[in-house]
Amino acid sequence: MSESQGQQDKSHPVLPPAAKVESARRAAELERQRRARASDAPNPTWWAPVFVTLLVSGLVWIVVFYISEGRWPVGAFGYWNLVAGFSLLIAGFAMTMKWK
């Protein structure tokens, strides 16, 4: 046996199968705990103002479209203004689902 092979054997010990299973279980448990801590973290301070702004701006967009009989907010969009307004509403509503 050469000297380099002897050094490789020392750096990578051979683990029995039970130790490998225990090591994998411990690693999985640590990862589960890390994910649980990450999901319990509070939202950033900008979260609530952004989703409220999206909800209000979507509502205002749709109301302005109907009141102006399709001339505003963007006359060239036509009925696609409804899609834009509802997209803002949906984006704001999706943000409320993640709010803590």
Image (cartoon, rainbow, N blue to C red):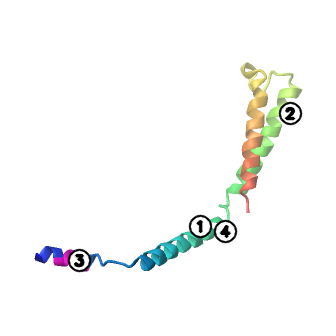
**Quick one: label 4 or label 2, which is nearer the N terminus?**
4
Q: CA distance from mark 4 to mark 3?
A: 43 Å
Q: Nearer the viewer, mark 4 or mark 2?
A: 4
**Quick one: label 3 or label 2, which is nearer the N terminus?**
3
Q: Residue at x 43, y 75 (%)?
A: 20
Whole-percent x, y for residue 75 in the image = 75, 21
**Quick one: label 1 or label 2, which is nearer the N terminus?**
1
At label 2, which amino acid type do we have?
Val
Q: Residue at x 75, y 53 (%)?
A: 96
Q: CA distance from mark 1 to mark 4?
A: 9 Å
> Are the two marked residues, 3 and 2, in contact with CB atoms closer than 8 angstroms?
no
Res. 78 image quadrant: top right
38 displayed left or right of 3: right
> Are the two marked residues, 4 and 2, in contact with CB atoms closer than 8 angstroms?
no
At label 3, which amino acid type do we have?
Asp
Residue extending furthest toward the front: 17
Callout 1: 10 Å neighbours few (<14), some, many (20+)? few
Q: Which residues are magenta?
A: 6-10
Residue beneath label 1, please? Answer: 35
Residue extending furthest toward the left: 2
Q: Residue at x 56, y 70 (%)?
A: 34
63 displayed left or right of 25: right
Q: Say which of 85 and 46 sits in front.
A: 85
Q: Is residue 27 visible?
A: yes
**Quick one: label 1 or label 4, which is nearer the N terminus?**
1
Residue beneath label 3, please? Answer: 9
**Quick one: label 4 or label 3, which is nearer the N terminus?**
3
Whole-percent x, y for residue 71 in the image = 80, 21
* SS for dot 4: loop
